[in-house]
């Protein structure tokens, strides 16, 4: 590393901003260059489908750091600029104008983009996706001035937008190929809870259904035609069928990829001078004992501290459990842990009133993950259960009168 090293961060979202902040907090004296494709300063994305879409928060309120902070901390911010290539031999990144920036250490924080399935009519006016502030603004205009929305996909984004739209009085039809909302994320038991939540708010759920075409008139979306031929009219269509990690420049540069950019416990890629953080990082997780890639806000917020330490030669593992949250109507929840395969779900509390904690148990009755719904004082206790990796007594776990510290088998 040179006497005055240059650290380049590619991606100016939450992860990129927090990494720049973490480097200065650790007294890195060199040059920090933060490069982002959007024209906006880094901002948090959860409000795009929640408070901002509801008209309750402005961009300024969820911008990560003000412009003055970057000036005060001598961060070279390049907005509206997409890095086109990485030359690992020369240790440079290429910009659209043909120029290059040399780096001593490089961080990739390029995030994800909306998946765009090849649905006929998907390029029509009135078809929306949701990943950026500009897309949220466009959708906000729709929810203010239109009365019927079709949402393709019953994942987190689709359901959050659905809830916001219903609270604005917009009629919503949700089309989902799976049998239940959030089936892949939460499983059947909790998928039923979210299905009932939205039906209770008069959402037209079309489950086990596919969209064959977005119908149009004069280049504008008018609704969707389902696989069984049914026509659903709409003033606008939101396609929310998941996210695609932005890993193309990493792959072209020869970094190891496997659904994301492969990184070790300390977020180092297959190149020791390059780290990856946030949505794109497929990490060998020390606490979970497997490789995971998490597309949620908490990773973008928390991983940069580890990445900064790694870039400064003080590697430390990132071991926080995956975490995410949602707010839909009167339901607020937090989920922590990792349970792609589980033996059963145990609940304590009242699911009908949507005040409960759900626990995903493994084959040996160890707690793999937990979700607290409208109950806010159990976070530390459920993390302790997961981290202990000890068997619990399912009956005691489901009994609200038993303290969570006293549910072990």
Image: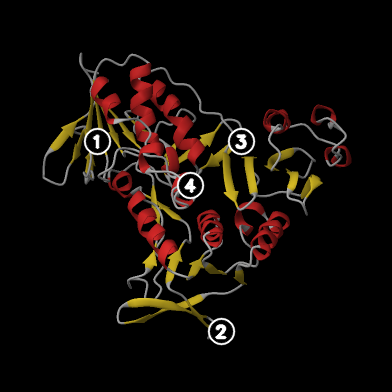
Q: CA distance from mark 2 to mark 1?
A: 51 Å
Mark 2 to mark 4 CA distance (whole Å): 36 Å
- Furthest residue toward left: 98
Which residue position is annotated with label 4? 51
Nearer the camera: disc 2 or disc 1:
2
Q: In terms of image quadrants, where is residue 370?
A: top right
* Disc 4 versus disc 3: nearer the observer: 4
Q: Position of residue 68 (x, y in %)?
A: 27, 26
Q: Residue at x 17, y 42 (%)?
A: 95
> Which residue matches tag 2?
228
Q: Quadrant of the C terminus?
A: top right
SS for dot 2: loop
Q: x and y percent of residue 313 in the render?
A: 37, 18
Q: Which callout, 4 or 1, points to the residue nearer the camera?
A: 4
Residue that label 1 marks: 88
Residue under the image location 35 percent in, 32 percent down: 17
Residue 152 appears in the picture as rendered: yes
Residue 202, by quadrant, is bottom right
Q: Position of residue 30 (x, y in %)?
A: 24, 18
Specify which label sits upstream in the sequence, 2 or 4: 4
Q: Are marks 3 and 1 in contact (CB under 8 Å)?
A: no
Marks 3 and 1, the one that precedes in the sequence: 1
Of the 4 image quadrants, the one containing the N terminus is top left
Q: Residues within 10 Å of mark 2 (few under 14, many from 20)?
A: few
For mark 1, give the secondary structure.
loop
Inter-mark Cα distance, 3 to 1: 31 Å
Nearer-N-terminus badge (3/2): 2
Q: Which residue is mark 3?
A: 288
């Amino acid at each position: 590393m040179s006497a005055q090293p240059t650290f380049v961060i590619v991606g100016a979202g939450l992860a990129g901003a927090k990494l720049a902040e973490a480097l200065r907090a650790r007294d890195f004296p060199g040059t920090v260059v933060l490069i982002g494709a959007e024209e906006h300063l880094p901002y948090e994305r959860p409000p795009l489908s929640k408070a901002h879409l509801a008209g309750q928060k402005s961009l300024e309120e969820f911008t990560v750091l003000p412009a003055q902070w970057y000036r005060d901390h001598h961060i070279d911010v390049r907005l509206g600029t997409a890095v086109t290539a990485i030359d690992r031999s020369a240790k440079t990144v290429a910009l659209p104008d043909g120029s290059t920036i040399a780096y001593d250490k490089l961080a990739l924080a390029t995030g994800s983009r909306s998946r765009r399935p090849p649905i006929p009519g998907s390029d029509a006016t009135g078809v929306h996706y949701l990943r950026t502030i500009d897309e949220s603004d466009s959708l906000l205009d729709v929810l203010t001035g239109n009365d019927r929305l079709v949402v393709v996909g019953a994942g987190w984004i689709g359901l959050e937008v659905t809830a916001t739209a219903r609270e604005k009085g917009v009629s919503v039809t949700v089309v989902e190929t799976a049998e239940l909302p959030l089936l892949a994320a939460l499983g059947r038991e909790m998928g039923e809870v979210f299905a009932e939540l939205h039906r209770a708010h008069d959402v037209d759920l079309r489950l086990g259904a596919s969209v064959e075409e977005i119908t149009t008139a004069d280049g504008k979306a008018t609704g969707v035609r389902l696989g069984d031929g049914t026509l659903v009219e709409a003033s606008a269509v939101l396609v929310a069928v998941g996210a695609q990690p932005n890993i193309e420049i990493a792959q072209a540069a020869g970094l190891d990829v496997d659904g994301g950019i492969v990184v070790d416990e300390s977020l180092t890629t297959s190149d020791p001078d390059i780290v990856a953080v946030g949505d794109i990082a497929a990490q060998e997780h020390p606490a979970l004992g497997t490789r995971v890639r998490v597309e949620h806000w908490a990773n973008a917020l928390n991983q940069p501290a580890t990445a900064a330490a790694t870039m400064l030669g003080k590697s430390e593992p990132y071991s926080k459990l995956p975490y995410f949250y949602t707010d839909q109507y009167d339901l607020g929840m937090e989920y922590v842990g990792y349970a792609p395969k589980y033996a059963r779900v145990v609940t304590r509390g009242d699911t009908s009133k949507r005040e409960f904690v759900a626990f995903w148990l493994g084959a040996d009755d160890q707690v793999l993950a937990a979700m607290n719904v409208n109950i806010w004082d159990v976070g530390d206790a459920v993390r302790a259960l997961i981290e202990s990796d000890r068997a619990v007594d399912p009956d005691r776990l489901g009994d609200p009168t038993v303290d969570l510290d006293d549910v072990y088998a």
